[in-house]
Amino acid sequence: MDEPAWSLGGRAGGGTIRIGILSRNSKLYSIRRLKRAASLQGHEVQFINLLRCSAYVDAGDHKVLYGNREVGPLEVLLPRIGTTVTQYGVTIVRHFEHSGVRVVNGSQAILNSRDKFHCLQLLAKQNVPVPRTILCRTTEDAVTAIANVGGPPVILKFLSGTQGIGVIIAESRESAESMLEALWHLGQEIQIQKFISESKGTDLRALVIGGEVVAAMRRSAVGGSFRSNIHRGAGGRSVELTEEEAGIAIAAAEGVGLKIAGVDMVESNSGPLVIEVNSSPGFEGLERATNRDIAGEIIAYAAAFGDE
Ligand SMILES: Nc1ncnc2c1ncn2[C@@H]1O[C@H](COP(=O)(O)OP(=O)(O)O)[C@@H](O)[C@H]1O
Ligand SMILES: [Mg+2]
């Protein structure tokens, strides 16, 4: 039988952990920062190009191939999976898990958070506050749903998406209906969500690592937009979360099973509401806003996790 392309056993010794960072692009800010932080902390770090990984199965055999090279051994894998490659990324992450590598975040947790409605289903079930959100499939039911979420205006949201792309505001019932019909026709499922107008184009981003809030910022949209994504030009300022906000962020991360999570919350009149939980949160804006070594915190956690 073929030798596995990855030898997964053994220890580097001396407190050194062999960390693999699984991503598509080694030039991204987050990947460069994570590699540097791992080296600074004395770990062995390897960038693993997701698209060069092949998942190999045969009866009684199961391995990840990386081009034609052998990579490893490896104690812990840190997946940083972009939203355009979720399915492939999750499959490869699962393959690593089956090969006995410790993975943070795990494949199921990534999947739980990637589908935003699935994420809200899990959170609501566990009593984590979320904006009222309805998924339906006919215009008749959409009319009821729009009324049910207090609109218009209402938020229409794709089930997956990032950087504010796929989040729409519909100012009238007619525009909501016509957009829904067009998007359904294209095969898209769309959530109808209460528009939290009192958040006034701001939101809170909390980074949760291992059940603790490590850093948080308030982001404010620019140019009259309601979307406060850093990629849409929003500015971020460091904030100290209230106990309530921190507790909700931690419960949200735990609720979807993520050890490392970027939790987005809007501040409503009835308190903070979780709108999404990110499994590969970018942290350039957060490092800038807070002056914290977020990459170092992620690596320290991953190394300890790999050493368990
Ligand atoms: N229900 C809502 N009410 C008010 N603003 C919202 C609502 N949902 C999203 N937003 C705004 O849009 C931004 C993007 O929404 P989000 O669900 O986080 O999607 P993405 O994955 O694209 O970041 C949020 O950061 C927030 O500023
Ligand atoms: Mg967001």
Image (cartoon, rainbow, N blue to C red):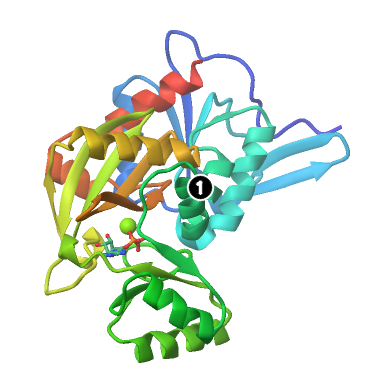
Please give the count of numbered marks on the rendered protein. 1
Give the image location of residue 161, x and y in percent: 42, 64
Ligand 1 within 8 Å of disc 1? The answer is no
Q: Quadrant of residue 164?
A: bottom left
Neighbours of disc 1 within 10 Å: few (<14), some (14-19), many (20+): some
Which residue is at the front of the view, 41 or 136? Answer: 136
Which residue is at the front of the view, 177 or 32? Answer: 177
Q: Residue at x 25, y 64 (%)?
A: 196
Q: Residue at x 54, y 76 (%)?
A: 188
Give the residue at the far top of this rendering: 14
Residue 2 lies, with reference to residue 158, above or below; the image says above
Q: Residue at x 39, y 44 (%)?
A: 128
Q: Is residue 78 visible?
A: yes
Quadrant for ligand 1?
Answer: bottom left
Give the image location of residue 210, x and y in percent: 39, 28
Q: Is residue 26 left or right of residue 49?
A: left
Q: Inspect the image, locate mark 1, and give the three-letter code of the amino acid beneath it.
A: Leu
Name the residue beneath numbered marker 1.
122
Q: Is residue 14 left or right of residue 64?
A: left
Residue 176 lies, with reference to residue 291, above or below; the image says below
Give the image location of residue 14, x and y in percent: 43, 8
Give the image location of residue 245, x and y in percent: 24, 40
Q: Is residue 47 visible?
A: no
